[in-house]
Image (tube, coloured by chain):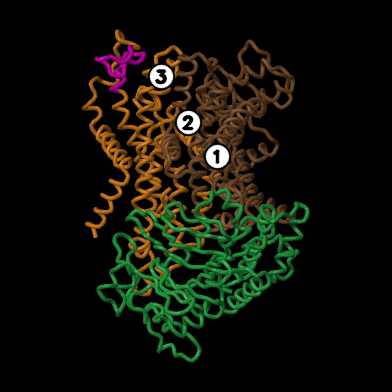
Amino acid sequence: MAAAAPLLSVENLSVEFRTRDGVVKALERVSFEIRRGETVGVVGESGSGKSVTAFSIMRILDPAARITGGRAFFDGVDLMAIRESELESRRGRDLSMIFQNPRTALNPIRQVGRQIGDVLLRHGGVGRGEVRSRAVELLAHVQIPDPERRYWAYPFELSGGMCQRVMIALALACGPALLVADEPTTGLDVTTQAAIMDLIDELAQAKQMATLLITHDLGLAAEHCERIVVMHAGHVVESAPTAELFANPRHPYTAKLVAATPRPGVALDDLAAIPGGLPDLRGDLPACRYSSRCEHYASFCDDPLPVQEPAEGHTVACWKPL
Amino acid sequence: MTAAALRHARYVVTENPITFVAFSMLLMLLLLALLGPALAPYDPLKSDTANTLKPPSARHWFGTDQLGRDMLSRVMVATRLDMAIAFSAVALSFAAGSLAGACAGVFGGWTERIVSRISDTIMAFPLFVLAMGIVAALGNSVFNVILATAIINLPFYARMARAEANVRREAGFVEAARLSGNGTMRVLAVHIYPNCLPPMMVQASLNLGWAMLNAAGLAFIGLGVRPPTPEWGILVAEGASFILSGEWWIALFPGLALMLAVFCFNLMGDGLRDLIDPRRRT
Amino acid sequence: MRLSFIRLFSRRLAAAAPGLAGVVVVTFCLMRALPGDPAAYFAGNAATKEAIEQVRVKLGLDKSLPEQFVVYLRDLARGNLGQSVTTGQPVRTEMLARLPASLELTLTALLLAVAIALPAGVLAATRPGSWVDQVIRVLTTAGVSLPTFFTGILLVYIFYYLLGWAPSPTGRLDSLFPTPPRVTSFYLADSLIARDLETFRACLRQLALPAVTMALFVMAPLARMTRASMLGVLGSDFIRTARASGLSRRTVLWTYGFRNAMLPVVTTLGMIFSFMLGANVLVEKVFAWPGIGSFALESLLASDYAPVQGFILIMATLYVLLNLAIDILYGLIDPRVRIEA
């Protein structure tokens, strides 16, 4: 399993935002890998850079953002180096994305079936005559009842859960090898959340599709991901197989995250909040961005961070892992 | 609180040098309006038959018209009338419209229905055409021009005020104030009305330019202000017939003055909008 | 879907009815508010006392106001707009004869404005902050400050007096040329239909400056609105999804971006039409264009008030109908308006 080359290999990705108040160093040397068919979760607080990472890989960042370094090898091709037109042909076909707030993520004045049709026409190698039937098939595939009629529906006529299913159909239309899911269940009620996640799992299994699940919900990641990457303030602080991460968290931040996650058997009163807040990402930052919140801080923590590997497949960016 | 407001104002001014320039030019125009007749080199109404249709020169910076009147003086003196008409009209429609709108928003029911009906009827006309009709019907006078311009601008203020008042009424301002023993009128006057004002200030500033164009347009076609009163629209009308024979200065300078004033009002409006509601920056 | 369109149309039509009613009532009140004796005005300056009395009876001005209103409504229903004193013709005939000129001018100006403003707005929005954007922003801010009558005069000075490119501003067609045989009453179309290219070009030359003047006035708010709307839409979530799906730049910009951006622009068209119908009068005066605006103005100055009343009624009715068309157009583009979820 470890011998196969990874499907996506992000190496030292760094991203900056130019804002009115200065340059925000949103991501600094972010690295991680995903193998074919694997489900990897990226977790962290709001503002930790999880979504920025996803948008950077697909290069659909805000115009104010700049990718200042790093590479993202997808199937042997560095996505950061290729031309926009080439990337355009890969997006939707080889790797695709689903977003939070599915209702606003769909074109409000275009029927959902036609939106799926647009993607099919672009990449799907489907002729004009078969587009509609193929789109209806896809809608059925994501378990939307009465897909024939729903083809003509507008997003405002559908519930949040149904819109998310449409987005999934849209993303999977051309059978991509990688699906990036940015907080796909935020804003949905709990039952729908479970249904959507199950659907994603099922489809990923069926097509041997890799999934990059971005979420602030560690519990959700625990349930659905084989490996978890933990981010804090634009840094990857730890990455490990799920069970290993929960059993032996090595980074102080991860340990606190695990302790703060609601799980069966743990009373809510016992959950500990993480002290402090994210550092200001403008201006000069210390080498370890967690140092201001860390109880184990020592002077050598100001040296450039190492990446240690205390166990197989388990990396941590810390001078004094737990 | 005022220190923060001043800082914010200074920030906006430095961020937006254009707004600052517009504001300064506007101050200059206001000064001209107040002091115009005193500063003008010649009597704007005095004709000098020896010096008709003279192009701009050292003696007459803007040249002279067909009666030998100095154009610079006429343009300068006209500033007062145009600015006065614009400000009066906007002030009138602001006051009447916002009051009507606020009452409609707070009281609802028949008040709202009547105000809406009147607003809609005004808006059913192309506005300049309605202004023409009103001035034609009531007669040519400065007051009627002001009245007509005020009437056609009423609906904008009424609508904005009504929306703002509605938001506050639904937020429970009225109930809360009543529970603490205040009458509805007092609530309206003290709590709701003042809060409706800031967004309408932006509208007012933008309206000033439009009101000025309106008045000048009416004067141009011979309605409202009549010659020989110096008013930019009339001056352009008088100069129009001379354009074909090449005497460009009679129409050009008043037209430019008009353009400049309206341009400043519009820039100011944009700047005010940035100051008050930075979210809606274009 | 067809059913909902009919429902949309009838609903909007019903909503336009009070507007029309208001127009009719207000115009009546306006024309009765004339200073002095209306009969004297309608009779004309040179009328004798008996003539004035005759006119008073004929116009029904001796009746009470409510009765007058009923007569007014009845006349309107029959399409009777009264008689013009200066030309001696029924107002309706005069207006109908002149309406095509005004319409040709206004439509050409609108097409011209849309053809330039929309692409300019889209261009500025796709290159925010660039010099193209800055130039367009300054031009549009300057544009909304332009007095139409002044621009017209300036253009005449530059293009007629200085450059000699434009013909003298004396109306629709140089008297050297025959008016094209009437099919649509639009000279441009008619001359093309008659395959008279010389006349077509002559008409075009006369139409150019007035159309440009009016178009300039309207281009600025249109471009501004397009730019702002486009900017807003391009930053929205569904555009991001479209890009993430790898849709071509053209599809994203036009099918997903532009169509959505047009919604606020269509709403702005209402205001634009209000400006245009008003500016019509001014442009027709500057260029001696024989439309209903210049006729109304001449009548006004001659104290001939029946045409003025007719003019206001026609313009206002036209405006109400145009707004109706805009509402329907909006409903066609935005399904959220015509479908109850």
Please give the label number shown on residue C36.
Answer: 2
Q: Which type of secondary structure does the marked residue at label 2 adopt?
A: loop
Q: Colour of chain C?
A: brown
Given contact means CB atoms under 8 Å apart, are the residues at marks 3 and 1 in contact? no
Which chain, by letter, is orange?
Answer: B
| Quarter of the image where the N terminus of chain C is located | bottom right
Q: Quadrant of residue B60?
A: top left
**Residue drawn at x 62%, y 26% as measured from the top left:** C101
Question: Whole-Å distance between the Cαs marked 3 and 1?
Answer: 34 Å
> Which residue is the site of mark 3?
B239
Q: Nearer the viewer, mark 2 or mark 3?
A: 3
Residues behind callouts 3 and 1 on a single chain = no
Q: Colour of chain A?
A: green
The residues colored magenta run B54-73
Residue C336: give x, y in percent of width and height: 62, 58
Residue A33: give x, y in percent of width and height: 51, 68
Question: Whole-Å distance between the Cαs marked 2 and 1?
Answer: 49 Å
Tally of numbered tags: 3
Letter of the chain that mark 3 sits on in the rendering: B
Looking at the image, is B242 positioned above or below residue C76?
above
Q: Which type of secondary structure does the marked residue at label 3 adopt?
A: helix
Q: Quadrant of residue B162?
A: bottom left
- Circle 1 crowding by C-alpha within 10 Å: few under 14, some 14–19, many from 20: many
> Which residue is the site of mark 1?
C118
The answer to whether residue A122 shows anywhere in this view is: yes
Going by the numbered disc 2, the residue's amino acid type is Gly
